[in-house]
Amino acid sequence: MDATSGKSKNGVRKGRLRDAEATKLRILVAAKSDFAKNGLGGARVDVIAAKAKANKRMIYHYFGSKDNLFQAVIENAYHDIRTAEQKLNLDDLDPKDALERLVRFTWQYYLKNPEFITLVNSENLHRAKHVKRSELIKAETRKFVAMVSGILERGVSSGDFRAGIDPVQLNITIAAIGYYYLTNRFTGSIIFERDLMEKDALNERLEFNIDTIMRLVSA
Amino acid sequence: MDATSGKSKNGVRKGRLRDAEATKLRILVAAKSDFAKNGLGGARVDVIAAKAKANKRMIYHYFGSKDNLFQAVIENAYHDIRTAEQKLNLDDLDPKDALERLVRFTWQYYLKNPEFITLVNSENLHRAKHVKRSELIKAETRKFVAMVSGILERGVSSGDFRAGIDPVQLNITIAAIGYYYLTNRFTGSIIFERDLMEKDALNERLEFNIDTIMRLVSA
DNA sequence: CGCTTAATGCACCATCTAGTTACTTCCTTA
DNA sequence: TAAGGAAGTAACTAGATGGTGCATTAAGCG
C-alpha cells in the first residue's frame, strides 16, 4: 500500500489535499489503534474519524460500516504478523535454531505490537465473525503451519526432536505462553504483586518460554 | 452468600417479595453473564436489570455504578476460582500428582467457566483498574502461589522436579496453555481450519498440556 | 397496630452514537 | 478548459444509554 506519497501525475509532492488511498489508510491506522484500545464495542466512530483527520462520512464511504472497518483492521493485523513470520526464513536454519528463533520472534512481535493481542481478543468476543469472512487469513495461516511442520520434520530427522508432535498444538503453545503473559500483564502485575513489564521480568519470561518449548519438543 | 433462601424470621419459606440479598445476588449473576458476553463497554445496564428480573434502579441502589458492579463481578470471579483451587488439597498429594491435578483442574475450570476468561480479558482491556482495588484477590493469589511453591519444593526434595523453577512463571504457564487455547477458540477454529472445541480435540489438548508442564519441571 | 426504614418501581433526562442527507470543492481527462 | 465524478464537509436524526428524582410499598420492631 503505497498510499502516503500523495503525488500528482507529474510526480511532484504537493501535500495531498485529495488522496483517497491516503485517507483510507489513515482511517485504517486510526481504527486499529482505537479498536485495540477500546475493543469493537468500546471504540467510537467519531473518535476514529478525528484521529484519522478525516470526516466520519469518509469511513462510511470507504468501509460501509463499523463492522466492515473492524474486519479490514483485523485482516490487516493478521496479514502483518504472517508476513513478518515468513520473512524469518526459518527453513534456512538448523531446526533447533529455527524453533528458538520463532519463539523469540513471537514474543517480541506481541511485545512490540500489543494491539494485535487486543484485536484478537476483541474478535473472539465476537465469535470470530469477521475473521470467518477472510480467505486470506486462512491461506496465510496454512502456509505458516506448513513451515512449522517442516521444522518439526527436519528436527525429527536430525534426531533433535521427538516424533509425533502436532504442529498446530505446538503453534498454539508457542503463542500461548507469550500471549497470555502479555494480554494479562495488568491483572498479572496486580495479583502476583510484581511488575511483569519490567525489563528483567520480560527477559526472564522469554528465556523461560524458550526453555518450555525446547523441553517440549526435545527427543 | 446464602442469599437465595428468602426466609422470614420464623424460618418459613415465603416466596420472598422483598429480599435485598436475593435481588443483589440475581443482579450479580446477571451482570457476570452479560459482562462476560459483551465486555464492560458492550454490556448494557438495562439488559442486566431485565435478566436479573430487577429494576434498573436496584443496580444503582446496590452497586452505585456500572463500574462498581463490574468490580463486584470480577472480584467474585477471582474468589470463585481461588476457592476451588484451595479445595483441591494438593498438599496431600505426591508432587507429580499434585501438579498434574492442578493442570487438569485449571483446564477444566476454564472450560466450564468460560465467563472467567472473558471477564479477565475485559479487565485487562481496562488496565486492571477494578482488580487494583481488591485486597481480597491479592491475598488469595498469594496463598495460591504459596501452594504451588510448596509442590515445587516437595518435588525437588523427592528428586522428581529440577530446582530453581519460579512458581509464578509456572503458574502463568499452566494458565496460559489452557487459557489461550480457549479464549481464542473462535479465531483458532477458523484459522487452523479445525474445530478446536470438538470432544477429541479438547482431550488431546489437555494431554498435550499435561505433557508440556511435566517436561518443563522434570529433573 | 402503627411507624420507621429499606426495598422497589416508574418515568424521565442529558448525552451519546452509528449512520445519513444534502451539499461543496477539487481533480482528471476528453 | 469544461464537465463530471470523486473526495470531502457539516449538520442532522432516531434510537440508545447510563444514571436519577420521587413516589410507593412491604418488613420488622416496639
Image: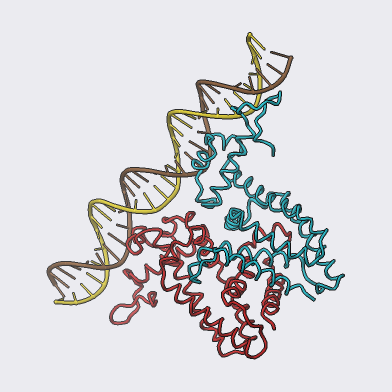
Chain colours: A red, B cyan, C yellow, D brown
Please report the residue visible at 43 percent of the width from the left and 63 percent of the height from the top: A130
Where is residue B184 drawn, in percent x and y?
Answer: 55, 64
Query: B64 or A180, which is in the foreground?
Result: A180
Q: Which residue is farthest right?
A: B157
Q: How many marks?
A: 0
Please report the residue visible at 82 percent of the width from the left and 62 percent of the height from the top: B150
Q: In this rendering, is residue A17 above or below B110? A: below
| The quadrant where residue B170 appears | bottom right
Q: State which quarter of the image contains the C terminus of chain A.
A: bottom right
Q: In this rendering, is residue B202 above or below D27? A: below
Where is residue B202 drawn, in percent x and y?
Answer: 59, 65
Where is residue A117 drawn, in percent x and y?
Answer: 55, 66
Q: Which residue is farthest front?
A: B200
Q: State which quarter of the image contains the N terminus of chain A.
A: bottom left
Please report the residue visible at 71 percent of the width from the left and 74 percent of the height from the top: A208
Query: D8 or A112, which is in the foreground?
Result: A112
User: In the image, is B63 to the left or to the right of A12?
Assistant: right
Query: B99 or C12, which is in the foreground?
Result: B99
Q: In this rendering, is residue B31 above or below A162? A: above
User: In the image, is A76 to the left or to the right of A164?
Assistant: left
Where is residue A177 drawn, in percent x and y?
Answer: 64, 70
User: In the image, is B29 to the left or to the right of C15?
Assistant: right
